[in-house]
Image: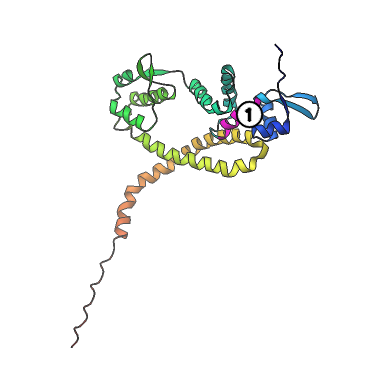
Amino acid sequence: MVATTPERLKMAEFARRSGVPSATIKHYVREGLLPEPDRTSRNMAYYDVALVPRVRAIKKLQRSLHLPLQVIGPLLERLDAHGMPPDEAVEGSIARVLAELAPERSISRASVIESGVPPSELAMIEGLGLLTPVVIDGTHSYQGDDAALLKTLGEAREAGLSPSMLPPEILATYLEALRGLVRAELAMFRAGVVPLAGGDLGRLTEVATTLSERLVVLLRRKLLLPTLKTLVDEPRAKPTARKAAKPKPRPKPRRKPKSG
């Protein structure tokens, strides 16, 4: 059987088929996400056409899921272990590998209920889309991040934060606030970073992702005390505001004298 020589592409054609600038491809090579190309001279390099789906997968992980390159590297290793899928199957494979990378823990639904979480509370959290039960060995369970979420809530209960203090409905409030934050963050990223980054998009995506996570933690910390002071002062200010805003009685309109 005659071995076929893999198709090699010059940088310009490889970048065109991959859909990313040549500078981004060079950045992926420097970060170890792509192998070094075959070089025939200092200024002439050839890339294996089979790497095109890999470059598209990296691009998708950065732009759609905003994953940093430190996370993309191990994820690509998982994909390589199963064989890099064709372009149309990349998204499903990525979702599968991300699930594999989730925390390796699971907890049965029955044990969650036995620990004191009422079924109605589980149903409410599931309704928010935060829990997706799976069947493991015939048992309805939660695994990965779902199990981690339930563990976090359980630790809050064990620490003395009762359902009356920290009701499960608070998760809906968190989701509403975070959804607005995420939308604002992505809108700024798409409007500011993407059109101006050029060939440096890969590196700047990683920087922006790390920076945004730090900013959220720091800004939340900065807002805690000023917001708490505002909440404490509000009850004192409300009566004065209501008294000042009380409308004055309107004068009664005068009746016109009857004619004739």
Front residue of 46 and 62: 46
Question: The magenta stretch spans which residues?
Answer: 51-63
Report which quarter residue 223 is drawn in: top left
Front residue of 137 and 232: 137
Where residue 93 sits in the image (x, y, percent)?
53, 24
In the image, taking residue 32 as reference, residue 168 lies left or right, namely left
Q: Looking at the image, which residue sits at the far top?
A: 1
Could you classify mark 1 by the number of other residues whose Cα lies within 10 Å: few (under 14), some (14-19), or many (20 or more)?
A: many
Q: Is residue 128 visible?
A: yes
Report which quarter residue 50 is drawn in: top right
Q: Secondary structure at mark 1?
A: helix
Report which quarter residue 170 is drawn in: top left
Where residue 27 sits in the image (x, y, percent)?
68, 30
In the image, taking residue 42 as reference, residue 22 lies left or right, namely left
Check the picture and name the quadrant holding the C terminus.
Answer: bottom left
Q: Looking at the image, which residue sits at the far front?
A: 1
Q: Determine if the magenta segment contains residue 251.
A: no
> Which residue lies under the disc numbered 1?
55
Up-down: is 258 above or below 206? below
In the image, taking residue 221 as reference, residue 155 lies left or right, namely left
Q: Residue at x 61, y 27 (%)?
A: 53
Q: Residue at x 50, y 37 (%)?
A: 216
Front residue of 5 and 194: 5
Up-down: is 216 above or below 251? above
Q: Looking at the image, which residue sits at the far bottom?
A: 260
